[in-house]
Image (cartoon, helix red, strand yellow):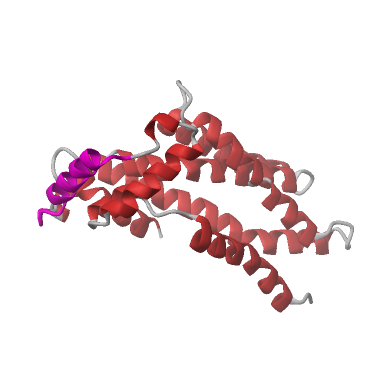
């Protein structure tokens, strides 16, 4: 019965802000710039990063350093690329299968929850005779994702946690939240789903760097792309 058009427009505003900010303020990766032959632009971005980190002794990339960057570009520009079947070689087959499973179940868990939650909370509002607000409850569960963005910054580089262990802990915690929601029923459903969304979002913050780092550079992009496609 709400205004879904207005809600759709409001939901698009953050993406618009991020898109504009990325276009006008975000710099291209200096590694990519050097790889495609834009040596001067790559040096400019590196100098900018250096200034922002207040490393004045490294502000200027001299002609000699640019020569090294040119040599690196020539080495990188060689036509060799590792074939896709390397993902299924004896050395990486186990990693590939495990990553595919992680991506699939993480997508299944998160998007399944996101899709079913409005129906659950709407039915909960009907059963309570209007005492509970389904839309407000959904908003509270979304808020559960916000702290995960900051918590992930701490645990992703923390010894004893890192990518792998934090991913394992958060998936277990998310599963426990679902089980408790099923057992306890409607009384604390919203807080439990908020917790589940928190842990699920935290696990996604670990999946991306983990997937990017377990493959060598030659087929890292292919490995990441295949895992993402299988997950979806």
Left or right for 4, reference 51: right
Looking at the image, which residue is at 37% across and 49% down? 44
Looking at the image, which residue is at 73% across and 59% down? 121
Pinpoint residue 108: horizontal percent, then vertical percent. Answer: 48, 54
Looking at the image, which residue is at 77% across and 55% down? 137
Q: Which sits in the foreground, 79 or 106?
A: 79
Q: Is residue 182 visible?
A: no
Q: Residue 70 in magenta?
A: yes
Left or right for 106, reference 64: right
Left or right for 135, reference 62: right
Q: Quadrant of the image for the C terminus?
A: bottom left
Q: Quadrant of residue 67?
A: top left
The residue furthest top is 160
Q: Residue 218 in magenta?
A: no
Q: Which sits in the foreground, 23 or 156?
A: 23
The magenta stretch is 61-80
Pinpoint residue 216: horizontal percent, then vertical percent. Answer: 22, 41
Q: Quadrant of the image for the N terminus?
A: bottom right
Magenta residues, dominant SS class: helix
How many numbered discs? 0
The residue furthest front is 63
Pinpoint residue 14: horizontal percent, then vertical percent. Answer: 63, 62
Residue 121 position (above or below residue 30): below
Residue 143 position (above or below residue 171): below
Q: Which sits in the foreground, 216 or 52?
A: 52
Left or right for 73, reference 50: left
Q: Is residue 80 visible?
A: yes
Looking at the image, which residue is at 60% across and 40% down? 148
Q: Quadrant of residue 175?
A: top right
Pinpoint residue 79: horizontal percent, then vertical percent. Answer: 10, 57
């Amino acid at each position: 019965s709400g205004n879904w058009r207005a809600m759709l427009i409001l939901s698009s505003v953050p993406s618009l802000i991020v898109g504009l900010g990325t276009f006008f303020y975000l710099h291209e990766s200096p590694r990519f710039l050097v790889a495609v032959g834009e040596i001067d632009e790559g040096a400019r971005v590196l100098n900018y990063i250096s200034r922002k980190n207040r490393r004045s002794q490294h502000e200027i990339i001299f002609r000699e350093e640019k020569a090294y960057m040119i040599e690196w570009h020539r080495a990188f520009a060689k036509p060799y690329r590792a074939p896709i079947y390397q993902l299924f070689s004896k050395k990486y087959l186990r990693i590939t299968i495990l990553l595919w499973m992680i991506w699939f179940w993480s997508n299944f868990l998160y998007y399944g929850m996101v899709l079913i939650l409005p129906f659950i909370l709407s039915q909960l509002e009907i059963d309570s005779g209007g005492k509970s607000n389904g839309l407000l409850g959904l908003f509270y569960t979304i808020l559960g994702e916000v702290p995960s963005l900051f918590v992930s910054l701490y645990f992703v580089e923390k010894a004893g946690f890192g990518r792998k262990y934090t991913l394992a802990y958060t998936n277990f915690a998310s599963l426990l939240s679902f089980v408790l929601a099923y057992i306890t029923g409607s009384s604390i459903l919203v807080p439990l789903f908020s917790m589940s969304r928190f842990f699920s979002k935290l696990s996604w913050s670990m999946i991306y760097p983990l997937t990017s780092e377990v493959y060598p550079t030659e087929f890292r992009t292919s490995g990441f792309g295949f895992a993402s496609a299988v997950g979806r």
